[in-house]
Structures are given as C-alpha cells and as structure tokens.
Amino acid sequence: MSIHTVLVTGGAGYIGSHACVELLNSGFNVVVVDNLSNSKATSLDRVKQITGKSVRFYEADIRDKEKLNNIFTKEKPTTVIHFAGLKAVGESCEQPHLYYHNNVFGTLVLTEVMQEHNVKQLVFSSSATVYGITDKTQYSEDLPIGAINPYGRSKAMVEDILRDLAAADSKTKPDKPWKIALLRYFNPIGAHDSGLIGEDPNGIPNNLMPYVAQVAIGKLPQLSVFGDDYPTKDGTGVRDYIHVIDLVKGHISAIHAFNKEQFLSGNCKAYNLGAGHGYSVLDIINTFEKITGKSINYKISPRRNGDLAEYYANPELALKELNWKVEKTLKDMVADTWNWQSKNPQGYQ
C-alpha cells in the first residue's frame, strides 16, 4: 500500500500542528503550507519532537498561485486538509474585506491549483458559525445556513463554492470526481498531552480557554464573563467544547471515509465535529481552578450582542458515516491546556 501525502494549509497553526502530529502517527507523509500570519514555525519543530518525523514546510500564502503550483508539482499530494484562514469574529466585523480575500479568494486559488493537478480530495475546516441564530439548541447538519458575521459568512461561502465544484465535476468528470468533507467545528480547546504544542494566539485571546489560561499564569489580569442571566443552569453561556486531538482525529476519519460508500461517486458532505453536549463558562472556570489549584480572577460583564444562551452539536452523522466521536473529557481539555500554558508561559516565544 502506497503512503499518501497530505498537504496541510495552515499546518503551523493551533489545529494544524495537532493535525500534523496525528497524520504522521497514522503513517501519512505531511507537507505544510503556511504564511505564518497567525502561527509559528517553531510548532513544526515541536511536531518533530513528538513524532520523531519531519514535515516538509513551505512558507507561502495560498493566494500565491505560482508558489502553490510549484509546491503541488514537487510534492504531488493526494489529499488536502485546508485550515488556512483568519478566524476572529470581532476582527472580521472590523475588516470584512480582509476575511473575504483571505478565506474565500484563498480557497478559490487553492481549489484551482488542486483541479489543475487532479487532486480532488479535500477536508475543509468549516465552523458552527455557519448556522447563525436559530431557535434550536442542538445543531444538526440539515439546519439552514444563516451566518451572522463576516467570519461565519466566509465559511458559508466557501462551503457553497465547494458544493458547486463537486456538483459540476460529478456531471463532467465522473471518473475523477471531487470528494469533499466540510467539517463544522464547535469550540476546540486543549493541547497535546506532551505540553509541546498548544494554542498560542497573537495578542489578547479571542476565545475563552486560552484567556482563562493566561489569567491563571498571570499574563492577563482578569477574565470578563459576558452575562450571568441567561436561561442556563448557572446563568452563563453554554457551548460545545471539543479537545483539539479529538477534532483532528475527525479529519483523519474523513480521509478514510473518502473510500467509503458516501464518497465513492464523488460528494461534498458536511459533518458536525462536537461532543453533543455543552459546558457553561462557569463550568470551565470551576474545572480549571479544581485541576490547577489556581484561582481565576473574573468579573461579570454585560451580555455581548449576538451571543446565544446555549448551543451544541448533534454529532450523530459523524458517528454514523465517519465512525468518529469525542473521547476526551473536560478534565482532559483543562489539564492539557494548563500543561501547555505552564510549560510555555509566553507561548512559542
């Protein structure tokens, strides 16, 4: 059996570096393309420490078609996992042009190059933000798309583009159709249990768990909890958190699924990657304090516009068709986050 080469865009980032570890441990060759705009090349040195194997790294932007063509010609990947994208909701509202150019145009260039090189297997890093506001608390893949910010809309646009590509090829090129998995993430947290790789956001973290960890280590003074009057068990918002290792294993499950029934004739299918239940903000804080022995300084602040009280994934389709489910607990997520943060108080610096 030949060893497949997987090209990972954004592979030096938080989720991408963890994906590299799991891909290498699963026997794949790995090629990383990353422009290092929100990542550090050091993460790939750490990947080698963990696995004993190297990835081939190209510092390049996926919007640079000439560079991307050269990489595909040289490396001949069979599959692409596409993580490269900007991901901060607030920033996307301030700089929508940047998000559409990077996330949407970047994917257009990538898929053009893939098509030219006859590489038709793609796992796309999408997001639960494509669902927008709904009266449901559990999101299944058949809910309508209704993203409410430029970040979510950029993901929804890319999903539409990929569905159109797959549909066109199924008619014109049935012998080599696109096989595309759209993986809609809920809230990835945690780190590799070695403590060598983890989340290292630029500037002030946008997400809860790295913010809590930086308060615990003394890098940030205080956490704001936005709203304690939601109709939830303790009044704080409830979200579906998923360990980053569980998440990236979902991508490998998707690659294996490309040879199964639902993808044999070419297809573009969406799958939720989540636990199927939620934890509140106070659950996260209390578990963090219990496991680390650190007191988290927080204050209650007013609700933020657009924040929902509670939502979580319906992960049944991923279990049925990808044979994937979460294995790690909230305690694992917290312990691994703290192991990374305490060993790397300044991240990869």
Image (cartoon, rainbow, N blue to C red):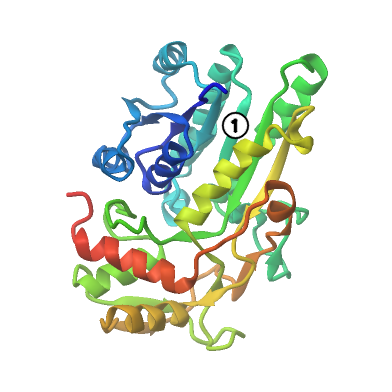
Q: Secondary structure at mark 1?
A: strand
**With respect to residue 175, does 54 lie above or below?**
below
In the image shown, does 323 or 67 lie closer to the viewer?
323
Q: Position of residue 174 (x, y in %)?
A: 79, 18
Res. 154 visible in picture:
no
Find the residue positioned furthest to the front: 1
Neighbour class for label 1 at 10 Å: few (<14), some, many (≥20)? many
Number of callouts: 1
Residue at image location 29% in from the left, 81% down from the top: 296
Q: Which residue is denoted by mark 1 in the rendering?
A: 122
Residue at image location 68% in from the left, 33% down from the top: 258
Res. 320 visible in picture:
yes
Left or right position of 120 against 237: right
Find the residue positioned furthest to the right: 171
Q: Position of residue 237 (x, y in %)?
A: 53, 77
Q: Position of residue 265 (x, y in %)?
A: 79, 27
Which quarter of the figure has residue 275?
Answer: bottom right
Which quarter of the figure has residue 217?
Answer: bottom left
Left or right position of 141 against 21: right
Residue at image location 58% in from the left, 73% down from the top: 278
**With respect to residue 327, does 287 lie above or below?**
below
> What's the residue type where badge 1 is placed?
Leu
Which quarter of the figure has residue 9?
Answer: top left
In the image shown, does 178 or 256 lie closer to the viewer?
256
In the image shown, does 105 or 170 lie closer to the viewer?
170
Task: Pick the quarter of the image with the N terminus.
Answer: top right
Q: Position of residue 49 (x, y in %)?
A: 26, 43
Residue at image location 46% in from the left, 38% down from the top: 23
**With respect to residue 40, does 244 lie above or below?**
below
